[in-house]
Image: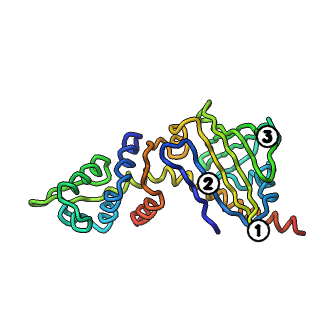
Amino acid sequence: VTAAEIIAEPGVPQVIITREFAASPAVLFRAYTEPDLLARWIGPRTYRTTVDMLEPRDGERWRYTHTVPDGDRCSFFGFYHGDPTPRQIVQTYEFDRQPGHVYLNTITFEARGSRTLLRQNTVFQSVEDRDVYVLGGMEKGIHASMAKLDELVTGLQE
Amino acid sequence: VPTDQLTAVFGALADPTRRAILTRLTRGDATVGELCEPFAMSQPAVSRHLKVLQDAGLITRTRRATTRLSHLEAAPLREATSWLAGYREYWEVGYDRLDELLAGLETEERS
């Protein structure tokens, strides 16, 4: 199992995730664009997820809703830009708790032998938006390596 | 944890010496003198770092006789790192679930 690499650099309104999967780009593409398949993997296991709409074509919409264990709900939604293909999906993203804060997601699937390298490049309207969404209001200028912090925190959780 | 404190926490963590001091404090409370040794720094320099850590709520300092002991406060650190941890977990759990789903789909496509 490969761990996802998540890069959120200080001062840049962007997050890049890379992750390898033991499947072809075509199969990964299905998991991203078939509503019943997407609902089976997106988000934590404890959430109930419904894909409310998903039309993988240029200008069409997608939307899914998470229901958390206490019954609270939140939705992510947006539009596809260009026809999604097993090479690339370009989509806008909005979170219903933050209306008007739109970000752009470019997902690429790159064949690596029998495996596929997924790259998700997310660009936000501002560094602040990125931080609010990803880091929950943390300020810019985070030079500390998150891996080191993880180690440190793990050491603290006795 | 309010945003201001998060800012202070991450500002404090941005410095490698301060992270090393925190790591040292996970093994127990220490005096300024004890913290100077491994870092080859003067007491005033270490004291300045301790002040930043204290202002961020990452350590508390208690006076004992003629010396002051620094004590690690783990809560703000856990809280602060949980922000990215939450995002990471969201995607990593999703990708793990996707692995399981893909295994089934690949088998299905081959048959």
Judged left or right of residue A98, residue A52 is right
The chain ID associated with circle 3 is: A
Q: Which amino acid lies under the numbered mark 3 shown in the image of this protein?
A: Gly
Name the residue at the right extreme.
B111
* Quarter of the image with the C terminus of chain B in it: bottom right
Which element is circle 3 on? loop
Residue matched to label 1:
A113
Judged left or right of residue B29, residue A41 is right
Which element is circle 2 on? strand
**Mark 3 touches mark 1? (CB < 8 Å):** no
The chain ID associated with circle 1 is: A
Q: Which amino acid lies under the numbered mark 2 shown in the image of this protein?
A: Ile
Residue A19 versus residue A74 in the image, above or below: below
Spot occupied by residue A28 in the image (x, y as percentages of width and height): 77, 57
Of residues B1 and B9, the one drawn nearer to the viewer in this rendering: B9
Badge 1 local density, few (<14 within 10 Å), some, or many (20+)?
few
Spot occupied by residue A80 in the image (x, y as percentages of width and height): 76, 39
Which element is circle 1 on? loop
Of residues A133 and B18, the one drawn nearer to the viewer in this rendering: B18
Distance from Cα at disc 3 to Cα at disc 2: 21 Å
- The label on residue A82 is 3
Residue at horizontal 77 percent and vertical 64 percent from the top: A23
- The label on residue B55 is none
Residue at horizontal 26 percent and vertical 68 percent from the top: B38
Residue matched to label 2:
A17
Tag nearer the camera, 1 or 2: 1
Badge 3 local density, few (<14 within 10 Å), some, or many (20+)?
some
**Of the residues under marks 3 and 2, which one precedes in the sequence?**
2
